[in-house]
């Protein structure tokens, strides 16, 4: 029962970060939580990618996304000379992304059935903007910088990650 209480408390903390009520500094510095966040992120991302790709490609894409996220966190924190915040920042980036991405699963399933569903498109766009804002919120706290600076860094991160993924895993046109 202690594990479930701990997981509930962690999820509640992550959700409060998604609502901009908490920051990554309030996430416990725990390699165990980093592992759990990594696993949760990997599972949710795998399910999302599996909606439009085969299982082997989905595994490679998830592994690449994890490498990008870990590398990004290490890079920005080492440039800012705050590498001691790596575990908390990375746990928070992965955990909040997993939570927001969970909401995207049914939306992407709808879009796979009806790519012109305007409500699903707008909902997906809202989730993407929410994720960008939450990423900026995490970066702001991790680096002790302004929100506008963090928005720019978060945009560069999201844009760069999508470009890398697009180059490594191009979307083939529908037959």
Image (cartoon, rainbow, N blue to C red):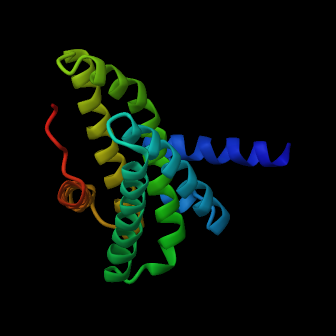
The image quadrant of residue 76 is bottom left
Image point 38% across, 84% down: which residue? 81
Q: Mark yes or no: residue 30 visible.
A: no
149 left or right, relative to 57:
left
Image point 77% across, 43% down: which residue? 5
Q: Position of residue 104 (x, y in %)?
A: 38, 32
- Report how many numbered discs are placed on residues in the image: 0
Q: Position of residue 100 (x, y in %)?
A: 42, 38
Quadrant location, the C terminus:
top left
1 left or right, relative to 99:
right
In the orientation shown, which residue stands out farthest toward the front?
Answer: 175
Q: Mark yes or no: residue 17 visible.
A: yes
31 left or right, relative to 107:
right
169 left or right, relative to 22:
left
Image point 17% across, 43% down: which residue? 172
Image point 49% across, 51% down: which residue? 42
Quadrant location, the N terminus:
top right
In front: 107, or 22? 107
In front: 111, or 125? 111
Q: Tell me if residue 131 comes above or below residue 64 in the rendering.
A: above
Q: Tell me if residue 135 comes above or below residue 70 in the rendering.
A: above
Q: Position of residue 141 (x, y in %)?
A: 40, 61
Q: Tell me if residue 110 comes above or below residue 83 in the rendering.
A: above
Q: Position of residue 31 (x, y in %)?
A: 63, 68
């Amino acid at each position: 029962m202690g594990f479930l209480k701990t997981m509930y408390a962690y999820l509640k903390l992550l959700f409060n970060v998604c609502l901009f009520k908490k920051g990554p500094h309030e996430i416990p510095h725990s390699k165990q939580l980093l592992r759990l966040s990594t696993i949760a992120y990997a599972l949710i991302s795998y399910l999302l990618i599996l909606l439009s790709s085969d299982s082997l490609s989905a595994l490679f894409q998830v592994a690449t996304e994890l490498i990008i996220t870990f590398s990004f966190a290490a890079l920005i924190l080492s440039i800012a000379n705050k590498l001691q915040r790596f575990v908390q920042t990375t746990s928070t980036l992965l955990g909040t992304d997993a939570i927001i991405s969970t909401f995207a699963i049914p939306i992407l399933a709808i879009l796979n059935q009806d790519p012109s569903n305007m409500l699903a498109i707008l909902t997906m766009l809202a989730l993407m903007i929410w994720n960008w804002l939450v990423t900026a919120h995490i970066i702001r706290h991790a680096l002790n910088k302004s929100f506008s600076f963090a928005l720019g860094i978060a945009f560069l991160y999201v844009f760069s990650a999508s470009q890398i993924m697009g180059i490594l895993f191009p979307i083939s046109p529908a037959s």
